[in-house]
Amino acid sequence: MSVLDILMNYYPAFLSGLWVTMQLSLIIWGSGIVVGGGLGILGARYRIYIGLPSRTVSFLLSGVPILVFLFWLHYPAQAMFDVVIDPFYTGAFTLSVINIFSVADIVRGALVDFPQQYLTAAKVTGLTREQTIFKIQIPLILREILPPLLLLQVMMLHTTLFTSLISVEEIFRAAQRINAQIYRPVEIYTALGVFFLAVCLPVNGFALWLKGRYTRDLSER
Amino acid sequence: MLTTRGLGKSFGGKTVLRDVNVDIAPGTITCVIGPSGTGKTTLLRALSLLDLPDSGVISLDGQDYSFPLQQGAAITPAPWPKLTAVFQSLFLWPHLTLRENILLPARNIDAAKAEKDIEGLIAFFEMQGFIDSYPNQASIGQRQRVAMARALILNPRYLLLDEITSALDVEQTVKILTKLGHLKERNIGVFLITHQIGFARKSADQIVFMDGGTVAERGGPDILDAPKTARLQQFLSAVHEVY
Ligand SMILES: Nc1ncnc2c1ncn2[C@@H]1O[C@H](COP(=O)(O)OP(=O)(O)OP(=O)(O)O)[C@@H](O)[C@H]1O
Ligand SMILES: [Mg+2]
């Protein structure tokens, strides 16, 4: 049985796994970018009241392995509060929290370290507030944060595989199930690897390209 | 008239400006000279109303700005770009080409005129060869010319310049300094920090000698030949030893 045959025969299972993975990723990416971006902006503006707590949380999170955090929210936390939550939501929530605080870190850092002299130049040449934000600040900040942000989102896609361990029926678990039926680990995991390469490599490549291009633009001789 | 009265500023307990009074009339060139670290740049940045002084009054054509400002207050009305400056480290925007650096603020005043004026400036400062590159691809002297053009195209009433010829060769320096001469005819007031004593002697209407955060001596260009204070005399004789 070739990779193609497996895909032909088991594509409904693959597709439903893929669909769950996509849903997870969209929730994690969306909440990370929107909530994390907002948290980062607020953290840069209110450094003590928002920036400091959010930095502390992300520092603590960086010390806990993702898998431990995920399992802890799945078993002990739910036992403690005597609730049972669909593992899909537990997974989406856990990974979203991690993404939100990581994105906030990147955004806040770029805002706080923004070189003030470019704003000075904008002021003294009479640019309006809107021009300063849209023509100077946002382009410069995007150049700074886009590459690490893209790399982080690819990493978050990878971490969705961990949710298979709290039995979320995402693509890795789908692959495991099929493998349990037909025992073709080489073909199945190769197909899975190729799938992730096809999705992630272009994004990673784009991030590296952006980084190379804009770092050159910005560095002063 | 751009004037300061009793300007003072300190950085963490260290007084950098002490009771500075200067008057810059439209259509005149004021040259600021003095040893390194005596507060020339600090004075220029205060005059530009960007790094605000701790005390004193800056008055711009009858509009007074008193310091310290009230808590949370902003500089209103905004004096820029009628009052503009070119700083020692230029501050060109790195993500825009040199041409865009000049045009972005200039279009606010008159977009059609900006497109026309820039051609004249490109020719005058001989910027044809590099105007479409990015700041990091240009030499310091090239960047100084661009920063100068970015300020000039705005048609300011008062132009503050901090050692803008430090990286230019003799020919380019002469060019810029000649350009400053033309600004007089357009009734622009120029405030220039410079180490070019020769230029100051020839073109300045007023010399301000800063020492230790105060104006130690001021007057016409004649004070460069007949200084009244021992400190200026000492400074000039050191300059003469080098040039
Ligand atoms: N942001 C700052 N924080 C602390 N001290 C400062 C700051 N800016 C300037 N100073 C101090 O103020 C003094 C005057 O600095 P300033 O840059 O005005 O000198 P300057 O006359 O322009 O010198 P130069 O000819 O070398 O450019 C210096 O002693 C400097 O160390
Ligand atoms: Mg200086």
Image (cartoon, coloured by chain):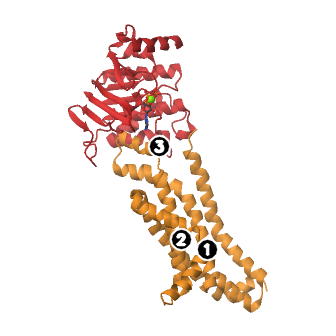
Chain colours: A orange, B red
Label 1 and label 2: CA atoms lie apart by 10 Å
**Which residue is nearer to you in this view: B91 or A163?**
A163
| Amino acid at pointer 3 | Trp
| Mark 2 vs 3: CB contact within 8 A | no
Label 2 and label 3: CA atoms lie apart by 34 Å
Vertical side of A49 occupied by B31: above or below: above
SS category of the residue bearing label 1: helix
**Which residue is nearer to you in this view: A188 or B13?**
B13
Residue A191, how many percent across, how many down? 72, 78
Establish whether labels 2 and 3 are both on one chain: no
Residue A85, how many percent across, how many down? 51, 88
Q: Residues within 10 Å of mark 2 (few under 14, many from 20)?
A: many
Q: Residues within 10 Å of mark 3 (few under 14, many from 20)?
A: many
Residue holding disc 1 = A159
Establish whether labels 3 and 1 are both on one chain: no
Residue holding disc 2 = A98
Of circles 3 and 1, the one toward us is 1
| Amino acid at pointer 1 | Thr
Residue holding disc 3 = B93
SS category of the residue bearing label 2: helix
Is residue A23 visible in the rendered image? The answer is no
